[in-house]
Image (cartoon, grey):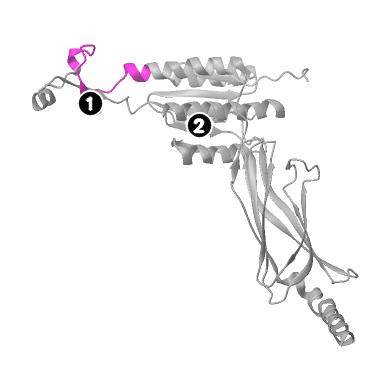
Amino acid sequence: MITFILAGLAAVILLLQFLIAPGASRHLRLRYDFDTQLAEPGETVAFSGRLINSWFLPILYINFYEYMPEGAVIPGNKSGCEAHSIYLLPHRGYAHTVLFSLPKRGVYRRGRYYVQTGDFLGFKSWVTSEDLDCGITVMPKLCTDEPVLRILGGYIGDISVRRFIMEDPVLTVGYLDYTGREPMKKISWKHSARTGRLMVKNSDFTVDANAAVVLNLASGSDAEKEKCLEIVRTVCERLERERIPYQFLSNGDAGNLEEGFGAKHVNQLMMNLGRSALFCYFSFDRLIERCIRERKKSRSYFIISAPMSAEEREALGRLQRYSEYEICVLEAEVDHDGC
């Protein structure tokens, strides 16, 4: 009796050996997702994967390797690879999550995974592999340069003051109780008569306030251009905070963006900045000519560049003659002798 049982087990092992193992890898499916397509430098990104056995038979030997995008940092793992040794019953899956970060600005398009299946006795194995299509863009860091932030803060403050004093009395967004501190011209006598108490108009800022953020990639080292991208991000986030619509213009592969503001607008810009290879397509002079052609009333200009040449400053002077306000120039200076 025992002999028959042992013979039966041996037959099962041989069945697994010769019939299941060679075709096992064809029945494994990986479904995966990354929790974001736009990330901060160093932000934790989650990869969620599920390896599924779509077969009606069990797969008893699986070695599964996942390589995150090149440059990814996995805590406690220097190789950038996650390894799993598992088995899967019929129509079952193995779910898991890998946390990693991408420390540098750029676009990360590919990772890779390998699935190794083998015979039950470990004599032979079969390996399949495929790319992981991630498409994650890492945006520039925020600028931390104190001189740049000081200039930017003062200029944004000037725009806020101009918006306050250029308040449009026609654009009324509501009414408030009169406190005695408002000027008499702001009292709405019609609304006061209707409510039985003094009411003042609550006017919004003029709708004409707008800005152009202009990036020059025609000069400077790669380090200076990287800092320019950081300054652009910082400027645009400050404009978003003040709800000032802005246009983005560049003479390089960072592209252009029509005037606007809001989450969709700034996210598209961060995508463009993250994907830039710092290429320049035409001169700063031509970029300034475009600014002049597309100028608008009440437009404030932010010019972001590496330290400019005499010719570039001359071009900037032409734009100043067409501008209603002083232009904010933010130059990205890098200490090449520093650590």
Secondary structure beneath dot 2 equals helix
Compared with 46, 210 (above or below) is above
Type of amino acid under label 2: Arg
The span from disc 1 to disc 2 (Cα, nearest Å) is 33 Å
Residue 157 located left or right of residue 129: left
Q: Is residue 115 visible?
A: yes
Residue 164 on the magenta segment: yes
In the image, which residues are magenta?
162-185
In the image, 222 versus 319, the foreground residue is 222
Secondary structure beneath dot 1 equals loop
Type of amino acid under label 1: Val
In front: label 1 or label 2? 1
Compared with 260, 108 (above or below) is below
| Residue sitting farthest toward the front | 1
Location of residue 9 in the rendering, given as x and y in whole percent from the top left corner: 84, 80
Say few, some or many: other residues with alpha carbon within 10 Å of mark 1 (under 14 / 14 to 19 / 20 or more).
few
Q: Quadrant of residue 115?
A: bottom right
Quadrant occupied by the N terminus = bottom right
In the image, 155 versus 41, the foreground residue is 41
* Residue topped by disc 2: 290
Query: Which disc is residue 273 wearing?
Result: none
Location of residue 120 in the rendering, given as x and y in whole percent from the top left corner: 84, 71
Residue at 41 percent across and 29 percent down: it is 243
Quadrant occupied by the C terminus = top right
Q: Quadrant of residue 159?
A: top left
Location of residue 287 in the rendering, given as x and y in whole percent from the top left corner: 55, 30
In the image, 132 versus 207, the foreground residue is 132
Say few, some or many: other residues with alpha carbon within 10 Å of mark 2 (under 14 / 14 to 19 / 20 or more).
some
Q: How many marks?
A: 2
Q: Quadrant of residue 76?
A: top right
* Residue topped by disc 1: 170
Residue 202 located left or right of residue 78: left
